[in-house]
Amino acid sequence: MNEAYVECLVKGKGPIIFKFLRYFMYFLAILGFGSIIFVGLGAIGLVLGFALAAGGYYLGMLAEVEYEYLYVDKELTVDKILAQNSRKRVASYSMERVEIMAPIKSYRLDNYKNRQTKDVDYSIGFEDKPDLRYVFYYEGGQRIILSPSEEMIKVMKNANPRKVYSD
């Protein structure tokens, strides 16, 4: 059997506005609960406080995003993990349908730059120094951005040497 199995966990960077809004909603929730005692709003303050606290919790989950890549025998699956407790399978890609995979700033992607594609970003969310993100074009219609580990790139390159480049 010639199966390959690699998994990689990447902590993505959620939008900074979600972090700000989370704490702002918590502050408003405290004011809502405080209005029960000091202003006498009663049920309205209670419902408002719980709604704002729930909204703050949800925004906190969106601010802490991780992606898990799982490569098993020419199949790449991507799971999205919110706040380290909610997991959802986002996508599954067959490596046989991938046109090319290379580092995001590779010269090998020059022929693909003018294509009209849908961009999907499952990476860390920002340009690091050095930039270790990879791009692959899937069935001509999608451009997927990932931040895989060196081990994952090595295994993918051994399985698909004509499609995966590490420059």
Image (cartoon, rainbow, N blue to C red):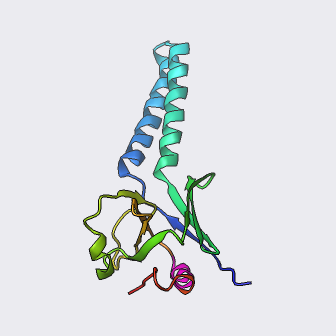
Tell me the quarter of the image containing the N terminus. Answer: bottom right
Name which residue lies at 39% across and 63% down.
Answer: 140
Tell me the quarter of the image containing the C terminus. Answer: bottom left
Q: Residue 83's spot in the image, x, y percent?
A: 56, 52
As drawn, which residue projects farthest toward the right?
A: 1
Q: For the magenta stretch, what is the residue range? A: 149-157
> In the figure, residue 9 lies in which quadrant?
bottom right
Name which residue lies at 41% across and 58% down.
Answer: 120
Name which residue lies at 48% across and 48% down.
Answer: 62
138 up-or-down from 30: above or below: below
> In the figure, residue 50 lies in which quadrant?
top right
Q: Total marks drawn?
A: 0
Depth check: give the residue in front, 80 or 102.
102
Q: Is residue 152 magenta?
A: yes
Depth check: give the residue in front, 161 or 22.
161
Left or right, 114 with reference to 65:
left
Q: Residue 143's spot in the image, x, y percent?
A: 39, 63
Q: Residue 147's spot in the image, x, y percent?
A: 46, 71
Name which residue lies at 54% across and 71% down.
Answer: 95
Depth check: give the residue in front, 167 or 96.
96
Left or right, 163 with reference to 17:
right
Q: Is residue 167 magenta?
A: no
24 up-or-down from 78: above or below: above
Left or right, 35 with reference to 125:
right
